[in-house]
Image (cartoon, coloured by chain):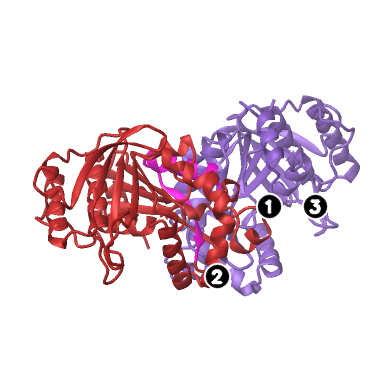
Chain colours: A purple, B red
Amino acid sequence: MPDKRLRISRAGDRAGRRPVLLAIAGDSAAGKTTLTAGLVEALGPERCVSLCTDDYHRYDRLERKSLPFTALHPDCNYIEIMEQHLQLLASGQPILKPVYDHSTGQLTRPELVEPNDFVIVEGLFPLHSKLARACFDVTVFLDPPEEVRRDWKVQRDTRKRGYTPEQVLAELEVREPESAAFIRPQRQHADIVVRFAPIAGREDSSDTPLSAELMLRPTIRHPDLTEVLQSGLHRAMHLKLTRDTDGRPADTLHIHGYVPREESVAVEKVIWASIGEPGSTSPECLGRLGPDARSEPLAITQLLLLHHLLDAGR
Amino acid sequence: MPDKRLRISRAGDRAGRRPVLLAIAGDSAAGKTTLTAGLVEALGPERCVSLCTDDYHRYDRLERKSLPFTALHPDCNYIEIMEQHLQLLASGQPILKPVYDHSTGQLTRPELVEPNDFVIVEGLFPLHSKLARACFDVTVFLDPPEEVRRDWKVQRDTRKRGYTPEQVLAELEVREPESAAFIRPQRQHADIVVRFAPIAGREDSSDTPLSAELMLRPTIRHPDLTEVLQSGLHRAMHLKLTRDTDGRPADTLHIHGYVPREESVAVEKVIWASIGEPGSTSPECLGRLGPDARSEPLAITQLLLLHHLLDAGR
């Protein structure tokens, strides 16, 4: 049961401060939950709350079977309510959030979400509308190559959601037109587009960690990476002035998964020091892919997002 | 499935107009649902929506068993979310309302409520806080004598909610301190206090319909009843200048249940004509207590509330 005193005292501490909101948008199994989990753990539950916009599904799994669209269609979601709840959270107010249970496919009892210093919103639709986008301080779109995402989706949905691989692949095909129409267009609205992928042209072994490409759009002020980039660590990370597919200029940060781990960790140390949080090394939880698996490109991506969050919160 | 076109066109029609909100507060089994049902049916679903604040229970029936308070305690309810939702509805915005299922005692999937021309909010807490009260155009408190309410509660909870009479009476006793502390104090904030009761001192038979006493506080402008009161129908209804228990002046309208039905119906006709809605007689649904039971004092009470609602909506 919630401790009321705690709630009141916390609300008091936060009086007059609105939370920092981060959006992590992307298609199903694009890595949103993994990216979010490390950030939430690093910030700590006492100052961070996260939510998933899948909870705003309008229909449960059974009802969707007889509908002419999938969960990727805006009409299959309470978009207007999602916008309203984002606005409430952004202005520091609590919401009673609906709950969609992925394990059963049912809509269940809603839960109270009280905004904290940081609110991380991940899901299919956080950047769908102008009203929703306006609520965020930083926006991210996860954009893995389709073949990478397909592998991730098959793995997750067979392990955690009780589907067969054939069902997952068939579902991906059914969803493709709505992915193209409603999910991928959100990419253009993100401040940061994150792409985890193997590097084209290299003959890396299959256990080589994926590299990350972060398109840093000039829509927000990005952390100054001069120190990292001049520290002789450019094999682990480098920055290029690029054009997006639509011609818009952006920086692209390349974080290489194939370099020896110590080089990546050295980059992490420099970024962590620049953030100004306590401790000489970044939290263990960053870069975690599972109980035994790590990705340093993921850790560096999360560090840059932490930098943004903490900066916006100051 | 909702017809999107219809929704948009209706929203268009209502553009710039905020709904009229009526609160019907009162203790458990005080007659809130019966009073509301007639109003909703008379106005029609195309322009009226109703909701019950019991849906804002924070805990389900099982959880409440181990708590030191009952559903009548504000801490047992999402009061802050209820206030937020009332504010949203009052400003013409939709809400995703939680749902408490009285038949199972469980909290279930929430439902979309889109404000209409009229929103009727009944429940234990609509007048609990200043913020909630500020959302309403007209506020009503149902205040039957405790022995009348006890009979109503035993009847309803044994028939519809699966309790035994002993359980209901025991529950009433447990709830009494919280009734006194949180529910009855809302009476002082109502524009209209409605009391259905037998008339003291009369030896009416037990099948005589209850009379109604309506305290009309000068907190809102009440309909001009001069015509009704001068039409020789004063046996069915009359008005008295009175003082409330706390000394505040108010009009009290006495509507007698013991007069022949045609006298009450004559009063209804005059009030209906003054409302200016189509038809020479008031809707059949007013005064309905059940499939075969009617109460003319209830019908007249509902007519006066309809008068208020339609007036506020103009």
Secondary structure found at label 1: helix
Question: Neighbour class for label 2 at 10 Å: few (<14), some, many (≥20)?
Answer: few
- Judging depth in this view, the residue of B138 and B278 nearest the camera is B138
Q: Are marks 3 and 1 on the same chain?
A: yes
Name the subunit of mark 1. A
Q: Do labels 3 and 1 touch, CB within 8 Å?
A: no
- How far from the left and from the top, in percent, is residue B101? 50, 64
Amino acid at pointer 1: Thr
Indicate the position of residue B52 as horizontal and vertical percent values: 43, 54
The mark closer to the camera, 3 or 1, is 1
Of badges 2 and 1, the one in the foreground is: 2
Question: As shown in the figure, which amino acid type bears the numbered disc 2?
Answer: Glu
Q: Residue type at mark 3?
A: Pro
The crowd level at tag 3 (other Cα within 10 Å; few <14, some 14-19, many 20+) is many
Based on the picture, tell me whether residue A226 belongs to the magenta stretch.
Answer: no
**Which residue is under mark 1?**
A33
N-terminal of the pair, mark 3 or mark 1, is: 1
Q: Residue A195 versus residue B40: which sits nearer the camera? A: B40
Mark 2 falls on what kind of element? helix
In the picture, which quadrant includes the N terminus of chain B? Answer: bottom left
| Residue A295 seen in this snapshot | yes
Is A274 placed left or right of A173 in the picture? right
Residue B3 visible, this angle = no
Q: For the point 14% across and 52% down, which residue is it?
A: B267
Quadrant location of the C terminus of chain B in the rendered image: top left
Tell which of A155 and A197 is nearer to you: A155
Judged left or right of residue A72, residue B206 is left
User: Residue under circle 3?
Assistant: A209
